[in-house]
Amino acid sequence: MAKKSKVKQAKKNKGTPRVAGVRATAGRDFQRLFQRKMNGEVGQYQGLQVWAPMDPYLGTQRREFKSAMTNPYVYRASRIQTTYVTGQGYTTEIVPRREEDVPDEQLDEWQRTTSYDVPYLNKKMTAEQIKDKVDKMAVDLDLASNIFNAYMTCLEQGRCVLALTPLDPDENGNWQLPEQIRLIRPEYTERPVLDDNTGELIGVRIIGVRSEIRDNIIPSTRFIYLMHGWNNELFSDYYGDSKISRIADEANTLNIVLNQDYERAAESAWYKPPVFSVPIPPQEAGNEEDVLTQFIQRVNDAKGQAIAVTGPSNPEETGVNVLTTPPHADIAGLEIVRQGLIKAIITAFGLPGFMLSEGDIGKLGGNANIEEVDAYLNQEIRPECKILEAKLEEQFFDRVLCILFQEKDARKLPCKIKLKFNKPKLLTLLTPDMFGVLMQMAQLGFIDESGIREMLGLEEYDKDTMSKGSQGGPDPTRNKLNNWRQPVQINLWQDGSGKMNITAADWVKTDEWGKMEAHNKDKASKEKWTKAQQLKKWSEDTRG
């Protein structure tokens, strides 16, 4: 007996609509890992908990930052900001630590006359001599170049460590003056070391460091620790905030557009690949791939690659046919994508767009966009300079002075060296209106002549640097400097009516000029006129 087939009944419950997707497809997403939880050792200090710091960026993210820096627009934007912040040079000034704001005249007198015992050098030195000593050491250590490189690294990775070597104290336990400044690569820079009680930075872990105090850790007294901004990630103290992190995705996408998409677009722009329909003879059945390969090798003779497909093989087939070719690359659409990515980079850095050589955003050269540049210097650059100046005063100059005075607490030092980065010159061309304003400022006493020259970027005239040249000989047809022969002579004379006349003629030959000169000398030797005779001769002259 045949069994009855069972028919499944559909459930009466309505299905819940769902959406499925895969990560390989394009979609919108946002970072959800902004909140962290951490289980570890914790210390107490005045009611506050001190946690060990954690790197806010994964290793893959830091590699993306480095890849983004290879983008020409990101590199140029970083270079511009670094040059404006640290690349214009700096000036230093030594002041009393307890009273930094002293009138200029009193400050000059204090610098020249006030002297201190300097135990490290075992001699007395005036404040001015101490400043000169520290300035000379900073130049020998190439402080400016190291700060430039470290700041650019901070823009990429968020922080950078400059080690002051030697890392170990002397046999008496006293720190020595720095002999070198060594930039520690980000790949070898690990976790900052914080004080368990105060949370202050007391060291940093560095791969490969050897020290008598503790291996793999440099104490805070022997490095300059620079950060860009403050990272708001939880447990990310002293890791800094990478500026590249904001536009790493855009920069790497732009790398693909510039390095791959434009190359492919260029290939299809000058070469439109045809598609051939190649009939396959019956005797070549099963060997279609070799037939197409041989055909393509015969027609491909350049970068562009033609496409061949099998066609029908019958008596009515006329031979190889050219089919409709695929569309070209959308160059205009690709250019819109490129400009959009570049504007994202400009926004992240706060740059005036014309500085990235994007002509559609602003004019280039001279005093163009001077308002935008002024706003950029005051809103983006000057605050960065202030932060960096304070860090260098604290971590370099104060520590050098502590070594000289053999004092552990910088607050007990008698003097302080203040650092100030030079502000970039805003004017490159001087208009009449600007010149008038500068002259009025000089008349009112706001600036002097040296201030005008500094604002205009002019050098003071120095006669000692001018070339004296070489005086020519009696032969006007020759120039001793380059032995160049004059082509013509210019004659300027006045006729009887007082009208000025000018004529041009070839120079006389050298031998004729020599005969004329000899004749004049001979005549002058024979007729030696007195002054009265010369005046009488001129008065009797009736020519014009």
Image (spheres, rainbow, N blue to C red):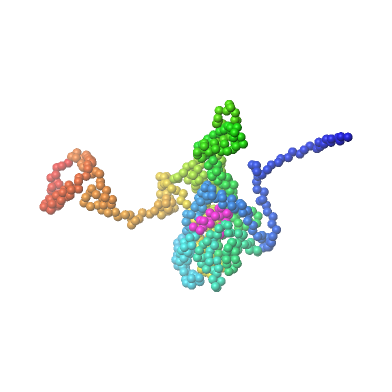
Tell me which secondary structure the magenta stretch mostly adopts: helix
Residue at 44%, 48% (x, y): give it: 427
Tell me if 503 is positioned left or right of 342 in this view: left
All told, the count of numbered labels is: 0
Check the image and name the residue furthest to the left: 526
Find residue 466 and report its horizontal and vertical position in percent: 33, 54
Q: Is residue 157 magenta?
A: yes
What span is in magenta? 145-161
Examine the rendered structure and indicate whether residue 317 appears above or below residue 423.
Answer: above
Residue at 61%, 34% (x, y): give it: 285
Q: Nearer the viewer, residue 61 or 44?
A: 61
Q: Is residue 88 magenta?
A: no
Examine the rendered structure and indicate whether residue 93 appears above or below residue 349.
Answer: below
Find residue 356 and report its horizontal and vertical position in percent: 50, 46
Q: Nearer the viewer, residue 94 or 472?
A: 472
Q: Nearer the viewer, residue 420 or 7?
A: 7
Q: Is residue 536 visible?
A: yes
- Which quadrant holds the C terminus? top left
Tell me if 157 is positioned left or right of 93 in this view: right
Residue at 69%, 55% (x, y): give it: 37
Which quadrant of the figure has residue 28?
A: top right
Examine the rendered structure and indicate whether residue 127 appears above or below residue 465.
Answer: below
Find residue 61 and report its horizontal and vertical position in percent: 61, 51
Residue at 69%, 57% (x, y): give it: 38
Find residue 130 and report its horizontal and vertical position in percent: 47, 66
